Image (spheres, rainbow, N blue to C red):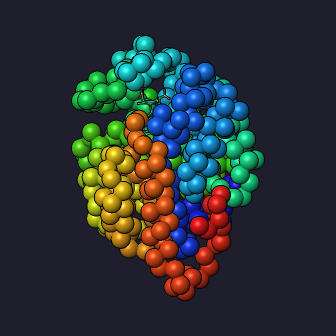
Amino acid sequence: MSAPESRFVRACRGLPVDRTPMWFMRQAGRYMAEYRAVRQHHSLVEICKKPALAAEVTITAAERLSVDAAIIFADLLLPLEVMGLPFRFAEGEGPVIEEPLRNAHDVAALRTDQASHLGYVSEAIRKVVKHFGETLPVIGFCGAPFTLASYMIEGGSSRSYINTKRMMYLQPLVWDELMSKLIAVLAEYSIEQARAGADAIQVFDSWVGCLSVEDYRSYVLPHVTRLIERLQTTGVPVIYFGTETAVLLPHMKETGAEVIGVDWRMPLDQAWKSLGFAGAVQGNLDPALLFADHKLLRERTYEVLDRAGGRPGHIFNLGHGILPGTPVENVLALVEFVKEYAGRNAGAPPLAGVAKGGGVHGNS
Ligand code: CP3
């Protein structure tokens, strides 16, 4: 860990902080001119594979926004390649996996011995950690086994996840083997990110909300729990995030993740309540509100913070990633609103044991 006393890491552990820490999923992305400038000369995968470029993109976004954590620039799908499933990003279509998995033979052919070839990600983390030192924590990440399996089986994005569910229902042993293989690669990959200095690991289970509680418990929970337990051997907190998870939240909590990331569909206090107010929560402003005017954006930001109610263990974030086309000035305004909200209570006695600093720009 590089910034264990930062307000972000303290909040992940449910400890009191001087103000609510924030960062945004997809904070480095196409909405930002600096990112688009780099993309003019390099493909997405090229940026991921060149540690100097990945570090630059990560640092630029965190500094431009002056948020409380930097998320390493990479992509969820990178592990597919080292398992033997090449993919590409098609213009306007999203990711495309050329030969999706369908049967036992395809799953048996997946490799688990090449995770070290993803070392470019941990190398990029080392560079970011070196740049920020103790002033700003760095978040590593990986996809959750279910969400990655859904890309491997569907061949890209999906509406119904029917091929994925078909494998779960009709070939449960093949499904288990796929989960085990993914866990082997994802654990090695993410543990390496923590060793490189990442202060937290976020596990993205973006599409898990397509499952019923029963299917989540039968086909996903035991596997993702195993992955999270392995990540926790590094000592860094784990953030477990999904969307459309209102009914799944108490079950997701059983993984033991320190932080549960929630989308915008459920009011934050209700989500936290369904987690028994145990552990930390991250979220949950609708990213579409970044297209609203500042008055509404401020109101809704304050509403999220009011619902968190000053309990220790809230990390402010969006309910999902920043959307392409989002006006950057609105993201900057959002950062100010979160800081301004904390300032409304200025003059109140500081909470005992609150760490100073933690942001690139101090306590502003
Ligand atoms: O958050 C960050 O700033 C870190 C970077 C990051 C990227 N992808 C870079 C990226 C992160 C955390 C991801 C995770 C990711 N990738 C997820 C999980 C998060 C989520 O949104 O639920 C998923 C599902 C993917 C797979 C993926 N990569 C998709 C569906 C797409 C969109 C395809 C498209 O054409 O819009 C990508 C591409 C991608 N990954 C972009 C970025 C900045 C945008 C495309 C680009 O620059 O060309």
Q: Position of residue 24 (x, y in %)?
A: 48, 49
From the image, which quarter does the N terminus lie in?
Answer: bottom right
Q: Position of residue 223 (x, y in %)?
A: 43, 42
Residue 263 visible in the picture: no
Q: Position of residue 117 (x, y in %)?
A: 66, 26
Q: For this rendering, which residue is in front, 265 or 235?
A: 265
The picture quadrant where one finds residue 123 is top right
Q: For this rendering, which residue is in front, 86 or 30?
A: 30
> In the image, is 114 to the left or to the right of 279?
right
> In the image, is 213 to the left or to the right of 260?
left
> In the rendered picture of this protein, how many numbered marks are placed on residues?
0
What residue do we see at 51% from left, 47% from top?
202
The picture quadrant where one finds residue 277 is bottom left
The picture quadrant where one finds residue 10 is bottom right
Name above or below for residue 46 compared with residue 22: above
Q: For this rendering, which residue is in front, 195 or 183?
A: 195
Name above or below for residue 333 compared with residue 79: below
What residue do we see at 75% from left, 47% from top?
130
From the image, which quarter does the C terminus lie in?
Answer: bottom right
Residue 337 visible in the picture: yes
What residue do we see at 71% from left, 51% from top?
132
> In the image, is 56 to the left or to the right of 212?
right
What residue do we see at 50% from left, 44% from top?
27
